[in-house]
Structures are given as C-alpha cells and as structure tokens.
Image (cartoon, coloured by chain):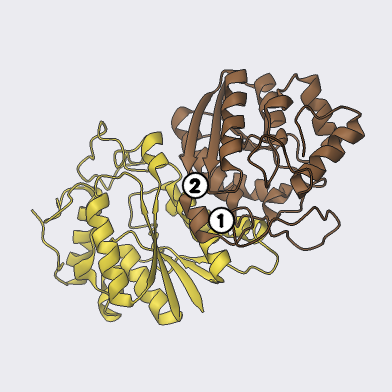
Chain colours: A brown, B yellow
Amino acid sequence: MKAVVLVSGGMDSCVAAAIANEECDELYFLHANYGHRTEKRERKAFYDIAKYYGAKTMEVDLDYLKNIGGSALTDSNIDVPEADLGRKEIPVTYVPFRNANLLSIATSWAEVIGAERIYIGAVFEDSSGYPDCRPEFYEAFNKVIEIGTKPETKIEVVTPIIHMRKSEIVRKGVELKAPLHLTWSCYVSNGPKACGKCDSCVLRLKGFREAGIEDPIEYF
Amino acid sequence: MKAVVLVSGGMDSCVAAAIANEECDELYFLHANYGHRTEKRERKAFYDIAKYYGAKTMEVDLDYLKNIGGSALTDSNIDVPEADLGRKEIPVTYVPFRNANLLSIATSWAEVIGAERIYIGAVFEDSSGYPDCRPEFYEAFNKVIEIGTKPETKIEVVTPIIHMRKSEIVRKGVELKAPLHLTWSCYVSNGPKACGKCDSCVLRLKGFREAGIEDPIEYF
C-alpha cells in the first residue's frame, strides 16, 4: 500500500512517518514551505528524514499562507510567545486552516498516485490546542474526501498519534527507531540550537523528560 | 458583510460574484493559477471582472496541481476531449480534489480578514459531473470549516447557482448585469476566440441558446 505522509520535519510527523513505514510499502513525503520562521531548518529536517526512510518527496510552496498572515509563525510583526500551556484561547501561532490546506494537497497527490492513506502527526490532548488538530476535524475531512474524489478513489486520513501524550510519542519513536535526532520542532530558531522556550520546544522537552529519555537535539 | 468569492474567470463564477455583490458589502476575489491550459486567458478575465466589481483580489499559484497532474487541464499529454455530456464516468478534465484546495485557501483568507461567506459558482445537474461540485461536498466542507477554525470564526461556503440550469445562470447573470462579455469558459483556447467544442463551451452555448440570449464572446 502507498501512503502520503505529511512531514513538517518535527518530532510528531517523524513518528507518524515511522508508523507509516511499519504499515505501508511505499512512502510519499509531502512538505510545505509557507513562509514560516523556521522554514529553512524544517526543510532540511524533512529531507534528512525522507532520506532515512528512502521516501519519495514533494515540496510545495504556499506563499499565500504568508501573504494571508494572521499567525506569529508567518508574520514577523507578531512575536512567538514563550510557552503557556495552560492558556484557554487558540494561540497566536495558529496558522489559519493550515492543516486543511495541507490535507487538500495530500489528497490531490494521493488520488493521482493511488495512495490509500494520508498520515498526519496531529496531536490533540498534549498540544497547543489548535482547532485543526482535533479528532473531529479529521473525521469531517475524511467525509469531504469520500464525497469530493472519484467513486473508485479510496483515501483515508489517519492520525496515529493524535491521542498520545508527548512522552508516548517519544517512546514510540525510540521503539520504531525513528530518527528523532534529525527532527526540528522549534517555532523560533533556524538552528543550530532550538530555543527551548516556545510552546513547541517546551512540549517536546516535557515529553522526553516524562519518557526518561534524553532529547538528541541541542537547545540554547 | 465581507465575502470571499472564488472567481475563475468563467461564466458561472462571474454570476456567483454578481449574486455576492447583491448580498454583501465588500468583495474579495480569489483566483488560482494551477498550470492549466487556459491559465493566461482566465487570469485576464479574472482581473477584468474584479475591476468591474471594484473587488479586492488575491491570486495564488498552485504549481503543485500541475506537478501532480492527472487531468487533461493540467497535463498536456492528456487531450481535452470534445464534449460528451451523456458520459457516466468522471471526465478527464477533473482536476483531482481541486475545489477542496481552493476552498481551503479561501477559508484561510476569510478567517484572517473576517469574511463570513465564501461564494463558489459550482454547478451540479447541468455540469460535467465532477465529484467536487456536488451539494454534499459543500455541506461536508462547511463542517470541516466549523470544526477546523477558531471558535469565534463563522464562515460558510455558499453555492448560489449549484441547482440552476445553465440557461438560468445566463438569465440570472443578465438580470444582475453581470459582465458576461468579460468571462472565459473554454478549456482549450487562450483566445481570442473560444473553441466551442469542449464540455465547458458546449454547456455554455447550450445555456445561452436555451435562454434565448446571444453569447457575447466569440467562438471559432
């Protein structure tokens, strides 16, 4: 079975790719540049992980997401805040409807190459609380795929780590020999070290700490 | 109320824009180039129609849809067939999951500018039979928007001409003084005249004929 895997270059998508690698024969990795702060470093992580898995790749440039703006990740006038995992509202790092854009591209690709699954490393409970990371979002998107593609097309979006805590994701990655040392999660830094302060770094570090495993990447 | 309108440059989206112009105060026209055959001519039609309505515009380049291929509109190795409105299968001019890609971009834009509606000139019965033109597709997509955006975001995709016959679309356009003379529907020709033979031309010409109105554009 062929699978498209959305690979940002972060830890979560790397573990989703590791799971896809267990379950499928041919991997097609999809990466999007959308003018986000850490585009350069994430792109490197993407190709490093793709090489590790021998996956075919497609890279897309979504300049319009930067032009549309409305997110601290794509608008340099909006600061990326330090982590605040207790907040109730949607964080300013939310990129409006980004995951629907990514899944639409993945579905177009999957339909043409005949891939039956799209893997995405969305995380729900132990996350920043983006609306497009909720399980219901993926259920609803699968309905759109079912209706909006050819009758003979069978594509399902799968979210293998959506209910895992970060520590479970770390353990699953280690168990499957996912190349976590090649990943990049930081929202702020383009390297060589991660900031250690943004939501994404703090969630990742907490996951490694709770798993009792040392994070192989370096922090400032 | 602000509205995003998907405007390809064809007759249907022009009439959808005319209806949006009746119902909303501020129009934001969205156009996509995706490496399709008539990209150049449609792009001109888009800007002509936008100027007519004084709409704000955004143009996006979706090169990946051409790279993905799988459609006669984006792959020069697949011929655009002459019209065959009686066919049962999905035509080769179907661009895989294109409308979901367009609606995702429109939703990202709408969420940031605070637009409450997205108009799309999809047509169901009197059409080529694309799966992403079915009413259920838009219902399902609205569910994805509701779940996948911020709680305070209220955006609805509206399909004002989806149940109209082509002749009704022509009459509605004339009634609302839509600039049908500026539109371009042909799948094959980049101008100055339309082919008159592809599905899109034949459906359009049939609509004008049944409405008893002369099509203001020229055909070979």
**Residue A219 locus on image (x, y percent):** 77, 37
Residue B203 appears in view: no
Residue B35 in sight in this render: yes
Q: Which residue is mark 2?
A: A148
Q: Residue at x 20, y 46 (%)?
A: B188
The amino acid marked with disc number 1 is Phe
* Residue B21, quarter of picture: bottom left
Give coordinates of residue B1: x percent, y percent.
Answer: 51, 79
Observer-nearest of B6 and A61? A61
Q: Position of residue A176 (x, y in %)?
A: 76, 20
* Callout 1–callout 2 Cβ contact below 8 Å: yes
Q: Does A214 appear above or below A62?
A: above
Q: Residues within 10 Å of mark 2 (few under 14, many from 20)?
A: many
SS state under label 1: helix
For disc 1, the marked residue is B141
Tell me the subunit letter for badge 1.
Answer: B
Give the secondary structure at mark 2. Answer: helix
* Pointers 1 and 2 within a single chain: no
Q: Does A35 sit above or below residue B143? A: above
Residue B59 numbered mark, or none: none
Q: What amino acid is found at the position of numbered circle 2 in the picture?
A: Gly
Quarter of image, res B191? bottom left
Task: Please indicate whether residue A220 sits to the left or right of residue B20 in the image.
Answer: right
Q: Residue at x 32, y 76 (%)?
A: B53
Give the left or right position of residue B89, taking residue A184 as reference. left
**Residue A100 location, x and y as percent?**
58, 49
Q: Is residue A220 left or right of residue B15?
A: right
Up-down relation of residue A45 to residue B156 (above or below): above
Q: For this rendering, which residue is in front, A78 or A156?
A: A78
Q: Is residue A212 left or right of residue B80?
A: right
Q: Residue furthest left?
A: B220
Marked residue chain, label 2: A
